[in-house]
Amino acid sequence: MTRKFLGLGLVMLLAGVALAGAKSAKLTGYIIDNACSARAAGENGADKVKNHTVKCAQMPKCAESGYAVYSDGKLYKLDAGGNKQAAEILKNTKAERGVQVSVEGDVDGDTIKVTKISEVGS
């Protein structure tokens, strides 16, 4: 009986630690595929992401790599659901480059579990 309570307590503690690691956030930034995301590193990273073309982000290898949002000098990788939504935005945008989005979700490290994503200005 004591082992059950100890095990249950340990599970609850680990769940609490996992939830404490994620924090709710609302970001505004630009979509870039993970294959090309190295462009955001270094000097003029923001300009490079803003000039990244929609056609490139939709190329098979780039699309398969998943997507990230560049916001405030940092890349946030999107979770699987966010990747699907980002692909739809890229498919339907009228922009040819620099697709700006607003993203809401829980940030854990460099990944955001997307609850909502939409193109800014559309």
Image (cartoon, rainbow, N blue to C red):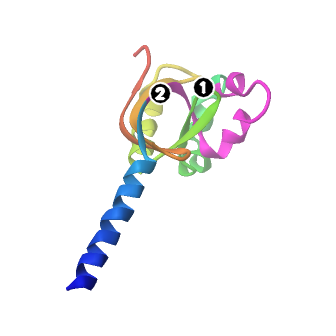
Q: Decide: marks 2, 1 in contact (CB < 8 A)?
A: yes
Label ID, residue 4: none
Residue drawn at 30 percent across, 64 percent down: 12
Residue appearing at x 43%, y 46% in the figure: 22
Direction from residue 108 to residue 40 in the image, left or right = right
Q: Name which of mark 2 and mark 1 comes first in the sequence.
A: 2
Is 43 a magenta residue?
yes
Q: In the displayed structure, would residue 81 be above or below residue 105?
A: below
Out of 110 and 84, give the one closest to the viewer: 110
Residue 82 percent across, percent down from the top left: 42, 42
1 falls in the magenta region = no
The secondary structure type at the circle numbered 2 is strand
Residue indicated by mark 2 = 27
Q: Residue at x 19, y 86 (%)?
A: 1
Q: Is residue 40 above or below residue 3?
A: above
Find residue 48 and report its horizontal and vertical position in percent.
Answer: 71, 26
Name the one closer to the observer, 50 or 94: 50
Q: Amino acid at mark 2?
A: Leu
Residue 88 in view (yes/no) = no
Relative to 52, 101 lies left or right: left
The residue singled out by tag 1 in the image is: 72
Around disc 1, counting alpha carbons within 10 Å, would you say few (fewer than 14), some (14 to 19), or many (20 or more)? few
Give the alpha-carbon distance from disc 2 to disc 1, as whole Å: 9 Å
Q: Is residue 57 left or right of residue 115?
A: right
Tell me the SS state at disc 1: loop
Q: Which residues are magenta?
A: 26-49
